[in-house]
Amino acid sequence: MEVEVCANENGKHFVRHNVYWWIEHKHKNPDPKYDCILQNLKNAVDRLPTIRWSGYRFRLETIVFSEDDVEVESVLLPLAMFEDLMRGNLDSRFNAKLIEEIKSGEYKPKLDDSKNIKLCVWLQSNSLSSLLSSNNS
């Protein structure tokens, strides 16, 4: 699975909302107004079992990829928030049998499992930031 991670000038890492949307909803380019991106993100954060991201200001930003001079408009999710959103809310995202397998550590990936299941399970005991630090050394 591909997860695009961006870094700003301060070295902070982000994931574009489009990546989150693609994993969760299986299409890549949500419409900011029609798909209620900002409100849906606020609601998703409110459902997390922590107040860590409560009050975070979501906003559309223009991002320039200097390597190929491409400009895109997207909401940037801090890397840790993306991970929390992907691993959070197991009970509301998956069926009871799958949740039990994930929580007990007995889950075995199946070919037809969706990206969000596979990433959620992987994030139960791993972190994307650990992959970034191993690639930089």
Image (cartoon, rainbow, N blue to C red):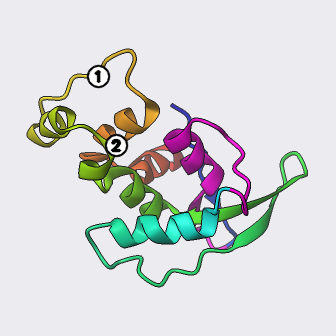
Q: Position of residue 91 (x, y in %)?
A: 23, 50
* Amino acid type for the residue under numbered disc 2: Cys
Q: Residue furthest top?
A: 111
Q: To which residue does mark 2 refer?
A: 120
Magenta residue check for 52:
no
Residue 46 vertical placement versus 34 (above, below)? below
The residue shown at (73%, 63%) is 33
**Would residue 106 be found to the left or right of residue 114 on screen?**
left
Q: For this rendering, which residue is in front, 63 or 120?
A: 120
C-alpha separation, residue under disc 2 versus residue under disc 1: 11 Å
Q: Position of residue 51 (x, y in %)?
A: 32, 79
Q: Residue furthest right?
A: 69
Q: For this rendering, which residue is in front, 45 or 12?
A: 45
Residue 81 vertical placement versus 99 (above, below)? below
Decide which of tag 2 and tag 1 comes sooner along the chain.
Answer: 1
Structural crowding at the residue carrying mark 1, measured as other residues with C-alpha within 10 Å and reported as few (<14), some (14–19) or many (≥20): few
Q: To which residue does mark 1 refer?
A: 109
* Amino acid type for the residue under numbered disc 1: Pro
What's drawn in magenta, residue-wise? 10-34
The residue shown at (35%, 77%) is 52
SS of the residue under disc 1: loop
